[in-house]
């Protein structure tokens, strides 16, 4: 008996710009070649013809023919990373997120910009059953994924620890840490079942290893520290399956969530404490994420890479 349905939006047909909607049940218990020259593509994907002409060292730095899942891929850092994976040769993109409006729009826009198949699954990352069913549906459509990039997360800042509600603490841990584990577990199980190596990339935070100033955000910091150490631990456990797990820890990034007047004063402080004297651009994680997803990083697992403009040096 189906308990609920997961909405799925698929964008794959160039002649049909609107997403094709369907659902998959949550229970209790082909390759598409798109020429790079296709009119209207703003982010032309790497074609097999061009790939074959690249030097071997450059070929390894792509995600050619890989199926890539990105959580939080509907906006911000995750959306930018998803597009970068398409440019680097991904065969298909799959976005997991909680907001169906943002997800549908992102899937349609990514498909329009890149020409490759894009699916969106409306999934609450705290719902392990929904995650399993969604990953199973991805496997049925594209085969076992090659790459998972966990970019979804929330932040609560400027709340004193003594005033932080218990329910808020559970929520931030459940989304940032538990959700990261549930996604990694489901995707890794599909890779193991297919006897297929893969790469898992966690978008953590420099806040997992430092205490930020001036904002009070102890609970967020704890959630991201957990993500980093979870990545190391899973890397050790899953190395025998050929599954690599690495983390990227960004500094302060110029995302839409940080472009609000209430943060203007704090952003001046953040900038003053950053050796590069600026916030990171949204696309400045792209190359690193693609590298960790690619075979160029094949001997790299359990690592955390900070990309913070030098903030954590001081």
Image: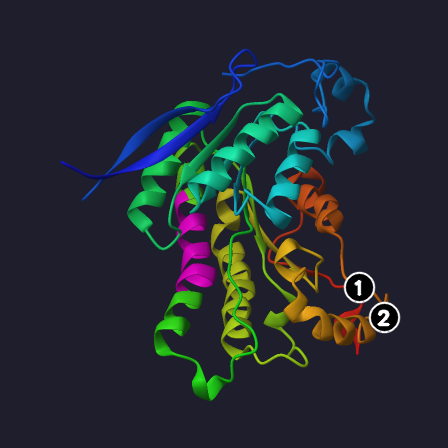
Q: Which quarter of the image is occupied by the C terminus?
A: bottom right
Pick the front one: 61 or 157: 157
Pick the front one: 57 or 14: 14
Which secondary structure, mark 1?
A: loop
- In the picture as drawn, the residue positioned furthest to the bottom comes out as 162
The chief SS type of the magenta part is helix
Q: Is residue 70 left or right of residue 90?
A: left
Indicate the position of residue 196 as horizontal and vertical percent values: 49, 34
- In the picture as drawn, the residue positioned furthest to the front comes out as 261
- Residue 68 seen in the figure: no
Q: Which residues are magenta?
A: 174-186
**What numbered label is drawn on residue 89?**
none
Which secondary structure, mark 2?
A: loop
Label 1: few (<14), some or many (≥20) within 10 Å? many
- Marks 1/2 in contact by CB < 8 Å: the verdict is yes
- What residue do we see at 54% from left, 23% from top? 117
- In the picture as drawn, the residue positioned furthest to the right comes out as 276
Indicate the position of residue 52 as horizontal and vertical percent values: 76, 18
Q: Is residue 277 left or right of residue 255?
A: right
Tell me which colouring the rendered structure shows: rainbow
Indicate the position of residue 87 as horizontal and vertical percent values: 70, 30
| Residue at which label 1 appears | 309
| Residue at which label 2 appears | 275
- What residue do we see at 75% from left, 29% from top? 59
- Residue 252 seen in the figure: yes
First reached walking from the N terminus: tag 1 or tag 2? 2
- What residue do we see at 62% from left, 21% from top? 115
Indicate the position of residue 56 as horizontal and vertical percent values: 79, 28
Res 143 → quadrant: top left
């Amino acid at each position: 008996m189906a308990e609920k349905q997961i909405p799925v939006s698929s964008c794959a047909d160039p002649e049909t710009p609107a997403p094709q909607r369907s659902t998959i049940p949550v229970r209790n218990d082909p390759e598409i070649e798109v020429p790079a020259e296709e009119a209207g593509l703003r982010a032309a994907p790497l074609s097999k013809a061009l790939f074959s002409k690249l030097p071997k060292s450059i070929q390894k730095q792509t995600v050619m023919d890989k199926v890539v899942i990105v959580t939080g891929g509907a906006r911000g850092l995750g959306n930018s990373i998803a597009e970068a994976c398409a440019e680097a040769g991904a065969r298909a993109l799959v976005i997991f997120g909680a907001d169906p409006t943002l997800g549908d729009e992102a899937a349609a826009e990514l498909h329009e910009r890149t020409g490759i198949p894009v699916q969106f699954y409306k999934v609450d990352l705290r719902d392990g059953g929904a995650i399993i069913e969604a990953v199973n549906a991805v496997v049925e459509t594209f085969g076992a994924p090659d790459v998972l990039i966990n970019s979804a997360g929330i932040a609560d800042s400027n709340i004193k620890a003594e005033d932080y509600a218990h329910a808020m603490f559970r929520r931030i841990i459940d989304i940032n840490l538990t959700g990261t584990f549930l996604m990694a577990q489901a995707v890794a199980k599909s890779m193991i079942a297919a006897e297929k190596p893969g790469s898992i990339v966690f978008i953590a935070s420099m806040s997992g290893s430092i205490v930020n100033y001036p904002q009070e955000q102890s609970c967020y910091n704890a959630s991201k520290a957990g993500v980093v150490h979870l990545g190391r631990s899973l890397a050790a456990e899953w190395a025998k399956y050929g599954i690599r797990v690495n983390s990227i820890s960004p500094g302060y990034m110029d995302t839409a969530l940080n472009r609000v007047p209430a943060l203007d004063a704090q952003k001046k402080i953040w900038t003053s404490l950053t050796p590069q004297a600026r916030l990171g651009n949204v696309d400045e994680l792209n190359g690193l994420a693609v590298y960790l997803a690619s075979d160029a990083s094949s001997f790299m697992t359990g690592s955390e890479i900070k990309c913070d403009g030098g903030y954590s040096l001081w």
